[in-house]
Each structure stands twice: as C-alpha cells, then as structure tokens.
Image (cartoon, grey):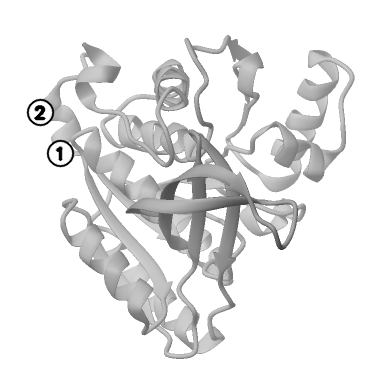
C-alpha cells in the first residue's frame, strides 16, 4: 500500500509504560580534580528531553501520527517538567500521579562530546496507582488502532498481563518493548521487540542464526505471540513469525549514539501497523528509522520526510 502523510495522520497509537525525564549537562573538561583522579566538568549548557515511553510516543507524533501516553509519575518538579515538555509535542497525556513516587530522571554529564557520567533518580510506584491505570487503559483502548507497551522495568507496567488481555480481547495489535528475563508476562502480544542482549538474557546465547531461529520460534510458540523481532545492532534485524525468518541488514551509515534507538524502531512499527501495514511490510522502515536515529545525539526522533522522502 502507498504510505502517505494523510494515511499516517489518521493512525492512533496508545503508548503505555515508564516515562522519564532525560537531562543533559554539557561542559568543558580542562583539568583533573585534585581530590580524586576524575575530570572536572565546568557546566556551560543544560538541556531536557522526554525519555523512555514518552520518547516512544514522541517518535509516533514526529512521524505525523497521533499518540496518547499512559504513564505514572510523581508529584515532583521532574514530573511537572516532563508534563510541560510533553504538552509541547502534540502527545495526549494521561498521567497517573503518586505523591510517594520519584519521577525517573536520567542525568547525563557530557564533556568533550562524550558521556562522562549518568546519574539515575528513581523508585517504584504504588500498586493502587497502577491499578487505576488499568481502568484508564480500558477507557482509552477502543479509540486507538495499536497498543504499544514500553517497559523500562521501573514498575509502571506491573499490570501488563491484564492490559494485554484487554487489548487482545478487542482484537488490537499489541507491540511490546520488553525488559528482564521473564517474558511470560507478555504472553498473547502480537510482537515483542527485544534487542540482542535482552533476547540472550531471556533465552540464552546462540551460536548461529539457525539456533537463534529455533530459540525465537520456541519462545513465540510458548508465549502465543504472532512474532518475535530481534534488533541486533550492526547485524540488522531478524523477524520470526509463522512464515519463518526474515532478516534485514543494518541501515546505519554512521553510529553516533544508540540512546533511544529501540524506542524509534518500535514506534515506527506501531505507527505503520496503525496505518495498515503488516509487520513484515513495516519492518524495513523500522530498520531504516533505527539507522537514522543512531546518527543523532541522545534520545532522538525520525520524521516522515527522513523516512519516506
């Protein structure tokens, strides 16, 4: 089918998961500290971006589609900054708030064009706030074409089993960017998109593509998934479904920063599937989008023009 801006504009994706605030402190490094053998960074510029599930949703709207974001945040400065940033993007926000939750912030300190240190601020949300998110999920489910779960293992998807069941009961396409080693909680999804190291953590290492295919197809059958898509960095992507295996080589011309590349890949898949493409049709575009975004710094996005023109 022809992919036009008009078709993409009608596509609606519901993104559910852990949203974060990405902070970047840039500075110059001219000396080593006299207190310890570490560089002294004199901060000259600060930047804030939306990260994790919020970045996934931002990738959807950057391509020209419609995205809603269902997430749990704290009642703190970082949550209000995150909400203000999301408000400028065109994403529809559905924020659950937990006063005891520390909104996840990843602070990266950059000197001489490289990351010197990352500092994470986080804790886990309360279960009653997460339960209320399940009812919010069922309320907004039917007005979207595709559901995308972005799991960053921060506690926001404690009820993902129930949400997948709700989505599949209404025949929605469900994509999951998984975390951890227990993929049983994603059973029944349409497709999961682990990267190479995440797949190895879940099913063990493989010696060649044939063994990977066996492990992936076994996982697919065990969890009743339509497909498993493994993103493999410089080795490209491998899709395993009922038709067998489909491999596409990497599309990256220059790798500058892999931060958020998985967000872009799954967001592209979700957007194009919401626009009517099959997973196999959407996969080469997602691969191309991932190749574009690793040439940019930090959590970044890909536009319709970059992808199709």
What label does residue 6 carry, if any? 2
In the image, residue 143 above or below residue 95: above
The outermost residue toward the left is 6
Q: Residue at x 58, y 37 (%)?
A: 193
Quadrant in the rendering for residue 91: bottom left
Q: Give the left or right position of residue 298, taking residue 115 as reference.
A: left
Q: Give the left or right position of residue 276, taking residue 130 as reference.
A: left
The outermost residue toward the front is 34
Q: Position of residue 16 (x, y in %)?
A: 42, 59
**Residue tagged 1:** 10
> Along the line of sight, which residue is nearer the eye, 37 or 306?
37
Q: Secondary structure at mark 1?
A: helix
Image marks 1 and 2: residues in contact by CB distance under 8 Å: yes
Q: Residue at x 41, y 27 (%)?
A: 293
In the image, residue 83 above or below residue 100: above
What label does residue 136 carry, if any? none
């Amino acid at each position: 089918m022809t992919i036009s801006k008009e078709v993409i504009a009608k596509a609606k994706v519901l993104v559910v998961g852990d949203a974060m605030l990405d902070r970047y402190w840039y500075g110059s490094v001219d000396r080593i500290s006299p207190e310890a053998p570490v560089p002294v960074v004199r901060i000259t510029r600060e930047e804030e971006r939306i990260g994790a599930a919020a970045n996934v949703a931002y990738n959807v709207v950057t391509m020209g589609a419609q995205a809603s974001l269902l997430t749990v945040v704290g009642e703190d400065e970082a949550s209000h900054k995150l909400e203000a940033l999301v408000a400028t993007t065109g994403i529809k926000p559905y924020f659950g708030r937990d006063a005891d939750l520390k909104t996840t912030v990843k602070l990266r300190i950059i000197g001489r064009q490289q990351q010197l240190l990352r500092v994470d601020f986080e804790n886990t949300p309360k279960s009653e706030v997460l339960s209320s998110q399940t009812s919010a999920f069922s309320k907004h489910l039917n007005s979207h074409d595709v559901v995308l779960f972005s799991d960053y293992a921060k506690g926001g998807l404690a009820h993902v089993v129930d949400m997948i069941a709700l989505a599949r009961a209404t025949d929605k396409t469900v994509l999951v960017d998984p975390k951890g080693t227990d993929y049983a909680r994603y059973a029944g999804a349409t497709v999961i998109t682990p990267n190479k190291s995440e797949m190895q953590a879940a099913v063990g290492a493989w010696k060649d593509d044939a063994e990977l295919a066996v492990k992936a197809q076994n996982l697919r059958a065990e969890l009743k998934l339509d497909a498993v898509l493994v993103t493999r960095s410089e080795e490209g992507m491998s899709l395993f479904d009922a038709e067998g295996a489909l491999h596409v080589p990497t599309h990256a011309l220059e790798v500058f920063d892999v931060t958020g590349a998985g967000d872009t890949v799954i967001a592209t898949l979700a957007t194009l599937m919401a626009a009517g493409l099959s997973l196999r049709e959407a996969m080469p575009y997602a691969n191309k989008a991932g190749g574009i975004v690793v040439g940019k710094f930090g959590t970044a996005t890909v536009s319709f023009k970059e992808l199709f023109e």
